Image (cartoon, rainbow, N blue to C red):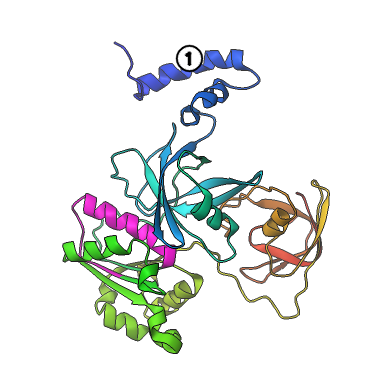
C-alpha cells in the first residue's frame, strides 16, 4: 500500500526521507533549500503568502493569507503572531484571525487597522501587497465560544476589536447554529465600521442576530456621557444582558468600564475579555527616565519614563525578540543588570539586579542596564 501525501503515513515517509537528505544539506537542512523553490513548503519555519488584500475602511485592511506546511486550524476568536519585515528590521505583531475555521480554501484572514503612531499597522495597511510572504505563528488564545455548552452571546466591541467577534459570528452562521445573539459595536462614524456592510446584511438576514451600532461622534460634546458605554445604555440596547455571556474586545477604556460594571453587578465571571493593548497605570508626575544601556548590543540611549524599553531599543536600531507587546507572551524577557525600571501596568519599580524584565511593558525609572 502506498502512503498518501498529507496522511500520517505520508508524513512519516517524508520525515524519513528528509532525515536522510538533511545529512547532505548540513549545516543547513533540506527545508532551507526547499524554501528557495516555494517558501510555503518549508518545515523549519512557518510562512504565509498574501493572496488578496481588501480595504474595509479608509484605515483598515483585510489580508487573505495562504499558510504553508505545519499550519493547523484555528478556533473562531483566536489570534496569531505575524512577522513584519520593515527597513531591514523584523517586527512581530499579534492579530486576531477574522475568518471562520470553516473556510474551505485553506486560507485565513487578518484585519488590521492603522492606529495612530503605529508604524507597523500603517505599513501593513499601506504597503503589504499580494505575493508577499510573512512569517506566522500558530493560532493561540482562549477567547472563543464553548463547544459543548450553549450560550446566549452578547458581543460588545469597538474599532478593530470586532475581529474576533466577526470570526465567531461567521463560524456560527457557517455551522448553521447561530443562537439568539446581541451585538453592540462602537465606531466614531458609520463609515468607520469594519465589516459594516456584512454586519448589516447579517442583521437583515438572521432575525436572531440583534445588531446595535453606536456612532460616538454623533453625540458631539455629549459623547462621553451618551456615546460611550454606560449602564443606562446597556439596559436600553440589551435589556436581557444579565442572561447572556458577554464577549468584549476593544480599547482599554471600554474594557475597564465593562469590568467595573460587571463586577458591581456580580457578573464578572460572565464577562470574557480579549485585549489588544496593555492597560497601563498612570505614571507618577515626578517620574524620570534615564540612560538605558544595552550591554550585549553595546548601546546606550536616553529614555523617558513612559516609553517601553522595547520601543526604546527598536528606535535605537536594535531588533530584540518580542511577541505580543502587552506583557503576556514573555518573548521579550531579559535580565536587569543594574539600575531601575518601572512596570507600566502596575507602577511597581524593579531595582534588584537579576530581576526579569519584560521590555514591552517596562520603562526606565532612572539609569539602568539590561542584558540585551
Q: Residue at x 21, y 58 (%)?
A: 178
Q: Position of residue 217 (x, y in %)?
A: 41, 80
Can residue 148 be seen here? The reply is: no
Check the picture and name the quadrant holding the N terminus. top left
For residue 67, above or below residue 153: above
Can residue 353 be seen here? The reply is: yes
Q: Residue at x 70, y 78 (%)?
A: 284
In the figure, residue 170 lies in which quadrant? bottom left
Q: In the displayed structure, does residue 3 sit left or right of residue 287?
A: left
For residue 176, above or below residue 308: above
Q: Which residues are magenta?
A: 159-183
Q: Position of residue 22 (x, y in %)?
A: 57, 17
Q: Position of residue 169 (x, y in %)?
A: 28, 58
Most distant residue in the top direction: 1
Q: Residue at x 44, y 33 (%)?
A: 68
Q: In the displayed structure, does residue 341 sit left or right of residue 183?
A: right
Disc 1: which residue = 17
Q: Position of residue 323 (x, y in %)?
A: 58, 51
For residue 258, above or below residue 312: below
Q: Main secondary structure of the magenta part?
A: helix
Helix, strand or loop for disc 1:
helix
In the figure, residue 312 lies in which quadrant? bottom right
Q: In the displayed structure, does residue 123 sit left or right of residue 77?
A: right
Amino acid at each position: 500500500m502506498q502512503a498518501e501525501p498529507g496522511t500520517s503515513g505520508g508524513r512519516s515517509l517524508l520525515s524519513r526521507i528528509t532525515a536522510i537528505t538533511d545529512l547532505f544539506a548540513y549545516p543547513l537542512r533540506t527545508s532551507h533549500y526547499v524554501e528557495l523553490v516555494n517558501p510555503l513548503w518549508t518545515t523549519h519555519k512557518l510562512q504565509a503568502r498574501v493572496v488578496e488584500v481588501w480595504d474595509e475602511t479608509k484605515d483598515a485592511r483585510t489580508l487573505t493569507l495562504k499558510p504553508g506546511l505545519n499550519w493547523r486550524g484555528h478556533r473562531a476568536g483566536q489570534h496569531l503572531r505575524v512577522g513584519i519585515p520593515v527597513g531591514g528590521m523584523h517586527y512581530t505583531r499579534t492579530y486576531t484571525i477574522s475568518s471562520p475555521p470553516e473556510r474551505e480554501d485553506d486560507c485565513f484572514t487578518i484585519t488590521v487597522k492603522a492606529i495612530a503612531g503605529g508604524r507597523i499597522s500603517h505599513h501593513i495597511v499601506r504597503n503589504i501587497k499580494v505575493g508577499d510572504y510573512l512569517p506566522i505563528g500558530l493560532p493561540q488564545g482562549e477567547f472563543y465560544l464553548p463547544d459543548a455548552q450553549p450560550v446566549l452571546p452578547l458581543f460588545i466591541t469597538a474599532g478593530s476589536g470586532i475581529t474576533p467577534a466577526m470570526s465567531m459570528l461567521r463560524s456560527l452562521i457557517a455551522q448553521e447554529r447561530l443562537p439568539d445573539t446581541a451585538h453592540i459595536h462602537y465606531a466614531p462614524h458609520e463609515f468607520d465600521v469594519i465589516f459594516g456592510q456584512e454586519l448589516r446584511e447579517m442583521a437583515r438576514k438572521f432575525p436572531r442576530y440583534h445588531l446595535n451600532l453606536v456612532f460616538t461622534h454623533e453625540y458631539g460634546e455629549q459623547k462621553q456621557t451618551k456615546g460611550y458605554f454606560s449602564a443606562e445604555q446597556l439596559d436600553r440596547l440589551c435589556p436581557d444582558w444579565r442572561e447572556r455571556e458577554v464577549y468584549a474586545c476593544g480599547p482599554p477604556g471600554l474594557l475597564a468600564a465593562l469590568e467595573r460594571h460587571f463586577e458591581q453587578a456580580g457578573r464578572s465571571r460572565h464577562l470574557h475579555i480579549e485585549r489588544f493593548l496593555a492597560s497601563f497605570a498612570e505614571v507618577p508626575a515626578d517620574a524620570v527616565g534615564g540612560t538605558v544601556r544595552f550591554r550585549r548590543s553595546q548601546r546606550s540611549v536616553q529614555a523617558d519614563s513612559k516609553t517601553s524599553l522595547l520601543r526604546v531599543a527598536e528606535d535605537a536600531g536594535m531588533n530584540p525578540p518580542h511577541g505580543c507587546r502587552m506583557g503576556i507572551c514573555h518573548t521579550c524577557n531579559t535580565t536587569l543588570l543594574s539600575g531601575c525600571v518601572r512596570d507600566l501596568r502596575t507602577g511597581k519599580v524593579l531595582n534588584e539586579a537579576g530581576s526579569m524584565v519584560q521590555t514591552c511593558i517596562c520603562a526606565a525609572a532612572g539609569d539602568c542596564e539590561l542584558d540585551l
